[in-house]
Amino acid sequence: MRLFWKWLLRDIQKDAGLKKEFLAALVSVLDLRGNNFHPLAFINGSPRIGKNVCVGFFSEINAKDAVVDIGDGCDIASFVAINAADSHRRCIGLSSEIDRKPIILEDHVFVGSHAFIGGGTHIGHHSVVGAGTILINGGDIPPYSLIIGNPAVIKPKNFIECMPNKG
């Protein structure tokens, strides 16, 4: 069986038509909805996503029954979860509803690989969310911030000194 997969992957890499056909079959088998980003990005609900936004493969944006607003020029790396839903209170019997809070990423926010952004988070423009950062109920994060770690640490105005003088 391993030999079959090795052969198939080798042929897919060599043949653009076969690569496209394989990807279409994978999208169909996984029942993925088409989107304007990577075909293996998972978009759920109706998030507002601005212009010139990149969403990497295996990233998830869950806006089902919630507000998720991603501004222009944002770059969301691979394996990122942006999820407005939190069901832990429902699962342990403290609530009968899934808690949903808005998520706002203003313009030109970069989100590093394997980061998680949960509901109740508003990230100001020109900010960077470091790889692996966990933001749950992150509150209002000012523009030009560097957000890193678990639990997240916010370094406001971290990049403002790097901006060219436009005076």
Image (spheres, rainbow, N blue to C red):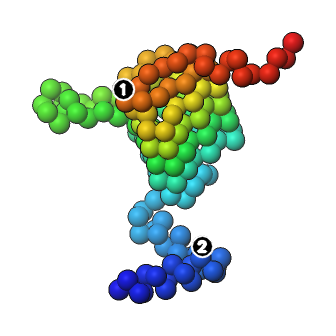
Observer-nearest of 31 and 160? 160
Looking at the image, tell me whether mark 1 or mark 2 is earlier in sequence order: 2
Residue in view at x 36 percent, y 26 percent: 151
**Amino acid carrying mark 2 in the image:** Lys
- In the figure, 83 relative to 159: above or below? below
> Residue at position x 60%, y 19% from top?
158
Q: Between marks 1 and 2, how big is the CA–CA gap?
A: 40 Å
Q: Nearer the viewer, residue 77 or 30?
A: 77
Q: Amino acid at mark 1?
A: Pro
What label does residue 20 carry, if any?
2
Q: Residues within 10 Å of mark 2 (few under 14, many from 20)?
A: few
**130 up-or-down from 24: above or below:** above
- Mark 1 = which residue? 151
SS of the residue under disc 1:
loop
Q: Which mark is residue 142?
A: none
* Residue 88, x across and y down, in percent: 22, 33
